[in-house]
């Protein structure tokens, strides 16, 4: 069985590389010729742990290839995965431009029976509209074969995408066609042997599962972040609160870590898209909408928190702030909708000079954040970033930051304020002796003293 992957982003590239490691002949297609040339040479355009090894292994084994030709992929593949981006538009709805381009290419070049699998996150009803379109095209072409369409949403965590692909939490297949179901079962036979849970449902339900899962996690993050803001005012400790909540197995401790807000390519756009689907169908999703608003509030509150400590009049003019971490989470270079962008923008707007360091996110930030060009100085290390700074703002909880030499770092700074927006150092035995330390979700002045530390 030959597999085609349309799109070589975080989802398509990882999915294609993993399937090729199982021995399937996989061809990945992208319109970006330079990107394809680099991929063919084994050079990944994204950072994802273990991905480079998979790419090299697939290329050397001859099971993984790359092309810019949609015609080649469509005509040579039995199963075609649509894994292109569905970015948010200004109104929050999903932009299906790239999906439509792939859909039109499949209708134009199909030369026999195919199974088209929607891997990208798509609004409810997209799967069926693709199926209807392809049926119409084939009738117009007077073709004797058919094309079946299935929904197979991805549940990859960036930074753990390869491991999630190799050992998924579940496989959701939305189709009403037995042949499509059978072919996907053949592709995912290894997961069946791993006893990975499989859920078979209709396309609309499969599409909703993806939006529902991401939105629920986003709601959970916004909930704990609002509790963190309240905890700071009443003298409670959000980490202990989260631990107490998480011990209830109906709640679990996952996604109860307070911070500067959620980001990335999934939660923000998927939650906005789900709100839009609700409005389109006359059903307001108040909880999801409130979580989106709370996330925006959380980022603004972090700017206020930093400004409130460093400046009595709200102006940060003359202050230099070192930002550690730009990617929306560790172990990825993805800076899309990262809280770091909004917080840095807020600090710059108040007059601060910002220095930044991220183990993987700086290249993406330099390329994408053109409006901040000249306002942010990108550094070669966290030590370089902190030098002569008035304060450090830890934005992303990269493991290497935990191992930083804080004793020497504080000596190189002009000030000694440390804003730990991920509570990475909350239990550090000496952090409060070295720095004027601020975490998220606790009133340091009430909970700690230098004598206790």
Image: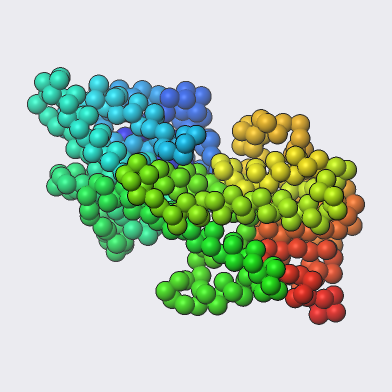
**Pick the front one: 14 or 413:** 413
Q: Residue at x 69, y 72 (%)?
A: 234
Q: Residue at x 42, y 33 (%)?
A: 95
User: In the orientation shown, which residue stands out farthest toward the bottom?
Assistant: 452
237 lies left or right of 134: right
9 lies left or right of 445: left
x and y percent of residue 86 in the render? 42, 37
Q: Give the colouring mode of the picture.
A: rainbow
The image shows residue 451, relative to residue 252, as above or below, that is: below
x and y percent of residue 335 in the render? 59, 42
In the rendered picture of this protein, how many numbered marks are placed on residues? 0
x and y percent of residue 223 in the render? 53, 62
User: In the orientation shown, which residue stands out farthest toward the top?
Assistant: 141
**Pick the front one: 327 or 343:** 343
Can residue 6 be seen from the camera position used here?
yes
Quarter-wise, where is residue 215 in the image? bottom left
The image shows residue 18, relative to residue 230, as above or below, that is: above
Q: Quadrant of the N terminus?
A: top left
Q: Residue at x 85, y 42 (%)?
A: 317
**Pick the front one: 59 or 189:** 189
Q: Residue at x 47, y 25 (%)?
A: 32
**Pick the front one: 75 or 146:** 146
x and y percent of residue 239 in the render? 62, 71
205 lies left or right of 161: left
Can residue 360 be seen from the camera position used here?
no
Quarter-wise, where is residue 439 in the image? bottom right
The image shows residue 92, relative to residue 215, as above or below, that is: above
Q: Quadrant of the C terminus?
A: bottom right
């Amino acid at each position: 069985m030959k597999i085609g992957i349309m799109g070589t982003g975080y989802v398509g590239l990882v999915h294609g590389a993993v399937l090729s490691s199982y021995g399937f002949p996989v061809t990945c297609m992208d319109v970006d010729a330079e990107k394809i040339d680099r991929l063919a040479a084994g050079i990944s355009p994204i950072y994802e742990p273990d991905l480079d090894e998979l790419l090299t292994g697939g290329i050397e084994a001859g099971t993984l290839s790359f092309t810019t030709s949609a015609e080649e992929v469509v005509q040579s593949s039995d199963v075609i995965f649509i894994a292109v981006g569905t970015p948010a538009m200004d109104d929050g709805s999903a932009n299906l431009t790239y999906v439509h381009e792939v859909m039109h290419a499949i209708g134009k070049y199909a030369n026999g029976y195919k199974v088209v699998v929607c891997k990208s996150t798509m609004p409810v009803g997209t799967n069926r509209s693709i199926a209807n379109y392809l049926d119409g095209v084939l009738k117009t072409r007077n073709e004797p074969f058919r094309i079946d369409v299935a929904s197979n949403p991805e549940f990859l965590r960036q930074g753990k995408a390869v491991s999630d692909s190799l050992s998924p939490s579940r496989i959701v297949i939305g189709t009403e066609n037995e042949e499509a179901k059978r072919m996907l079962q053949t592709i995912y036979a290894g997961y069946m042997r791993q006893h990975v849970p499989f859920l078979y449902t209709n396309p609309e339900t499969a599409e909703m599962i993806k939006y529902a899962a991401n939105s629920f996690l986003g709601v959970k993050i916004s909930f704990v972040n609002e509790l963190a803001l309240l905890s700071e005012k009443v003298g409670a400790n959000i980490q202990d609160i989260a631990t107490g909540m998480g011990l209830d197995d109906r709640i679990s401790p996952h996604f109860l870590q307070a911070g500067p807000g959620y980001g990335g390519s999934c939660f923000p756009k998927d939650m906005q898209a789900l709100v839009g689907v609700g409005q389109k169908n006359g059903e307001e999703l108040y909880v999801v909408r409130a979580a989106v608003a709370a996330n925006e509030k959380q980022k603004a509150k972090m700017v206020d928190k930093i400004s409130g400590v460093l400046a009595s009049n709200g102006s940060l003019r003359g202050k230099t702030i070192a930002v550690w971490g730009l990617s929306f989470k560790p172990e990825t270079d993805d800076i899309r909708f990262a809280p770091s962008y909004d917080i840095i923008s807020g600090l710059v707007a108040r007059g601060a000079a910002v220095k930044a360091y991220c183990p993987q996110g700086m290249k993406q930030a330099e390329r994408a954040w053109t409006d901040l060009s000249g306002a942010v100085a990108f550094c070669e290390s966290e030590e370089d970033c902190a030098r002569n700074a008035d304060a450090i703002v830890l934005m992303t909880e990269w493991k290497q930051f935990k191992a930083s030499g804080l004793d020497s770092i504080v000596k190189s700074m002009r000030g000694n304020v440390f804003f730990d927006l991920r509570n990475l150092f909350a239990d550090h035995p000496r952090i409060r002796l070295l720095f004027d330390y601020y975490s998220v979700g606790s009133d340091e002045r009430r909970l700690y003293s230098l004598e206790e530390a």
